[in-house]
Amino acid sequence: MKRPRQKRRGGLGRDAENLIWLATGLAESGSRAEDRYWDRLLCDSLDRILEEGGEDTLNAALDHLYAADPRAYDELADYIESRAESASGVSPDHDVLLIAAPVLAWSRYRIPSNTISSAVLANLRVHMQAHVLADKVKLALADFLFSPDQLPQGYCATAAFAAELGRAAVAGKDLHIDTEGMPETAQFLSDTRYLLAAIAVPKGEALFAWQQSERTREQSMTQWRMQGGACLTPLLPGCAMEVVLPEAYFAASRQADKDSRPYAIRASVAFLGAELDMPAANVRAVIAPFYDRELEEYRVGLTLRGKEEVVHGVVWPLLGAEDETADSHSEIEAVLRDCGVTEIVNLEHRFPLEYCDDCGAPLYPSPEGEIVHAEMPDEHGEQAPRHLH
């Protein structure tokens, strides 16, 4: 998905130069007719590169355009995501799409990533087809609830996974995930889990319920929250959870990233209330910007009213095109006030993007204007997760 680009060394290969030319042509196009010409060439080129595993080629082209031509960068990033999640070579008679149904969760215990039983899969299938998908869709579900660390890494791996799951959708079967060797999941108080699926429809038919005139996204979201959420609850014992509307893989992942920021604040305030028997009105929040070369994120240190020690913290990363001009600061404050936190300290100092040398946890701002480790009070017995994802 679209991320700030990191500059890489080395020249551009022929395939990368061709992608840059095609994306620039599409960005500068002045008509739909010309768009179709560039579209065909760009899709053909990307499908070949994705199938060959040319991850470095894709990243080299994106890196170059990120600095040289933002419009062409956006076009190329959109097309790479689209081709990676669409599994175009799976069936000549079907449109295939990899989709994700993210779940936001928090718990003072470990948030599970686990295999989904056939009975739960069957229930999820019924409600996803009834409330989210269009009438003619074939659906294949992956039988595992993924953590962010366990998702396909990179565009080529995403395309390969989309093709495998897409073939299962065309065949009308779910996909078993082999968990041997799967990465371990880090422990966070708040995190995201992903139900992954592929859908297949006859060429040109509607993919989602809201593409049909009698349904809206809001209606689908309401029904999925009620019915799909109830099916997912047994997979996340001991967790509070909130579902995100199932959508195309990259779009759903971006929405989950966006929604996870206010969710993490609400989870942190609720956690302190449960662990320390502390109402939100007795919590003080300290908001500060953190920089590398540019503003990267805000961090929120949480203290108890009248005390200086930071007992917990939340990271609010900037996403996509957000920068210093975005009103993230006001959004964070609004979420805190909605949670019942009334004492909020705003620090304008440019803090460095630093982490604990021992455990790697972010350092958070204190009311005194320092960056410190978040530590629960000594009288708090059981060890809880140190920070939010």
Image (cartoon, rainbow, N blue to C red):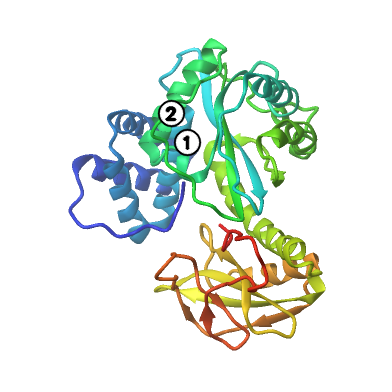
In contact (CB < 8 Å): disc 2 and disc 1:
no
Circle 2 crowding by C-alpha within 10 Å: few under 14, some 14–19, many from 20: some
Residue 82, numbered label? 1
The image position of residue 309, as x and y in percent, is 62, 80
**Comes first in the chain, label 2 or label 1:** 1
Kind of residue at disc 1? Ser
Which three-letter amino acid code belongs to the residue tagged 2?
A: Phe
The secondary element bearing badge 1 is classed as helix
Can you say whether 230 is above or below 187 in the image?
above
Q: Is there any visible trace of residue 303 in the rendered image?
A: yes
Q: Is residue 36 visible?
A: no
Query: Which residue has dot 2 on it?
Result: 161
- Across and down, in percent, residue 202 comes to 57, 15
For the point 53% across and 42% down, the residue is 147
Q: Residue drawn at (39%, 70%), measured in percent from left and top?
A: 357
Residue appearing at x 52%, y 23% in the figure: 96
The number of numbered discs placed on residues in the rendered structure image is 2
Q: Quadrant of the C terminus?
A: bottom right
Q: Which mark is residue 145?
A: none
Categorize mark 1 by other alpha carbons within 10 Å: few (<14), some (14-19), many (20+).
Answer: many
Q: Secondary structure at mark 2?
A: helix
State how far apart marks 2 and 1 are (Cα): 14 Å
Please name whichever residue, 336 or 27, is drawn nearer the observer in this view of the structure. Answer: 336
Name the residue: 43% across, 23% down: 163
Task: Answer with left or right where residue 16 lies relative to residue 41.
Answer: left
| Camera-nearest label, 2 or 1 | 2
Residue 346 at x, y = what percent? 65, 82
Q: Is residue 135 above or below residue 11?
A: above
